[in-house]
Image (tube, coloured by chain):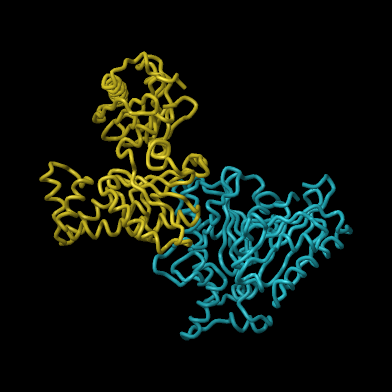
Chain colours: A yellow, B cyan
Amino acid sequence: MGGRDSLVGGVDLGGTKIQTVVLKNHQVVGSSRVETPQTGADAVLAAIAGSVRTSLEVAGDSLSDLAAIGVGTPGTIDESNGSVSNSPNVPGFDAGPVPLAEELSNALGGADVRVDNDVRVAVRGEWKRGAGRLYRDLLGVFVGTGVGGGLVLDGNLRLGRGAAGEIGHTIVKDGGRHCGCGKEGHLESYAGRARIEATARKWQAEGRKTRLFQIMEKKGRDRLTSGVIAEALTEHDQVAIELIDEAVWALGIALANAANLLDLEAVIIGGGLGDRLGKPFVDRVAEAAGPRLHVPERPPTFLTTELGDLSGAVGAAVLAGG
Amino acid sequence: MGGRDSLVGGVDLGGTKIQTVVLKNHQVVGSSRVETPQTGADAVLAAIAGSVRTSLEVAGDSLSDLAAIGVGTPGTIDESNGSVSNSPNVPGFDAGPVPLAEELSNALGGADVRVDNDVRVAVRGEWKRGAGRLYRDLLGVFVGTGVGGGLVLDGNLRLGRGAAGEIGHTIVKDGGRHCGCGKEGHLESYAGRARIEATARKWQAEGRKTRLFQIMEKKGRDRLTSGVIAEALTEHDQVAIELIDEAVWALGIALANAANLLDLEAVIIGGGLGDRLGKPFVDRVAEAAGPRLHVPERPPTFLTTELGDLSGAVGAAVLAGG
């Protein structure tokens, strides 16, 4: 798709932000990030188109050079027409289908638009342009508000019947801590930021002392962001330390199980919390998984992301031929 | 390999028995089963060759019609020459390489010999000629002395770096019951026959009453075979019931995790214990996995094997072109 010098846009659509990049010859030449409007689908579509235009301006290029756009989005995607439904965190996308591909194409000079799942485009980004370039078999794990995942097996992104990659809902402790999905004892119950926050609030209500919420207020946040958790760790906050210990433990179990079943070459750990805590965190997860591997002398390589919070947008552009 | 009417042999080599089949036009036309000699590699090789000859006689055919032979074996296989090492349960195969392919070819008129892992050939058998024929994505789980597994993904047997499929060493309860591999809390710790027997002995030593060992003696066995366990269940032996309840629970967790990660179309449950307990057992496992699936409205189909204890031998023959 597109000639040698044509531009390809990539969009990572989330409930709080829209991250856009523009690629030329496989390189990021422009990027833009805006907050996701909270007023409905039309505003979200306009914000995406505006962010793509800004990225083009940053790159010093114009809309007429744009060959195609890829979009990564949460929710259910109708592959036949690139429409999106059931995406509860994106305003206006929570119910019936939004014709995302059609509207974006109209707004952006008729460019081809490809749409895929947000986690899968992030895996694609790291696989094709990031930490996973050397591998044909890898698991990407995105530790953020929840825990998402995606698999590359024998050089292909694994789809299954459309829902493959749900490492976040691996049972690490049957009957254990509540998960955001309504079930119990999942990897996400212990490693997802939202469940870490809920557990910290519960422990505090039970009388445990923690600096987490003071740090949150000091930073002007209304939730325990990755930055808040990271600062609490540097202050040796015991609650934060225990919660991250449990996240590491849960990741060690879930990733060892996946590695044992699939004999993976590599595991890439990213997402808001994964990227923020970085290599020391990933190294601890590798240490937790190690003794649980069936062939411990040949572990998968545990890696941080290379693209960080651009994994999704770059992967979306790759999907569209960038 | 082989013309339309040529014969292909398949061998399932185990520590206690050697099962052989001969296929013509993809159909089993002869089979033979012998005990595995306990006196060394030469005796084992001779027994395999003898069993293939018997299968040919049963089929009314002769060695000159045999185009190729496939062998499934435990241990480490050198794919370059079909030799086998590190197979502790097969006499003489426990240490340095035995030139299995070469010796068998010499003993059987120069037929081509292909060698693969015992669990993988069983998965291949069920996938190509058994319960898995309709599927491109399946997990085969063989619940026997241990618990082995193999994956077919997008219509290909998953190898990974050679060790894919180790569902038996999925952690279902971190720090739980000892596993045969030396670690703890694995699926095999709860569902493998050897660990079920060890736990029954421990519980009996602790004062719990069970009919399991009386049934074993009555049947003239020196271990808790699948038949002994099945009979204890029909006698409502409480220890047997609890142990199988735990096996079902552990299978439910491990298979739900695998299904969530891979979005599998089908799970086939076989092996000595799986085949013996049959459909009621497989249905119970499906019920245990169901509530743990991330997309419960679209579960994988849970199936018994169709080939039973011929899965491995038939799959070995398929490997060799049969």
- B127 to the left or right of A156: right
Name the spot of residue B275 as percent of width and height, x first. Answer: 64, 63
Q: Nearer the viewer, residue A272 or B79?
A: B79
User: Which residue is at a point 38% across and 53% down the rendered structure image?
Assistant: A183
Q: Nearer the viewer, residue B157 or B93?
A: B93
* Quadrant of the image containing the C terminus of chain A: top left
Name the spot of residue A115 as percent of width and height, x first. Answer: 42, 29
Residue B169 makes an appearance in the image: yes
Residue B279 makes an appearance in the image: no
Name the spot of residue A96 as percent of width and height, x first. Answer: 40, 29
- B163 to the left or right of A207: right
Q: How many marks?
A: 0
Q: Nearer the viewer, residue B261 or A98?
A: B261
Q: Nearer the viewer, residue A95 or A98?
A: A98
Which image quarter: residue B32? bottom right
User: Which residue is at a point 74% across and 73% down the rendered structure image?
Assistant: B43
- A295 to the left or right of A201: right
Which image quarter: residue A25? top left
Name the spot of residue A314 as percent of width and height, x first. Answer: 36, 32
Vertical position of residue A210 compared to residue A141: above or below:
below
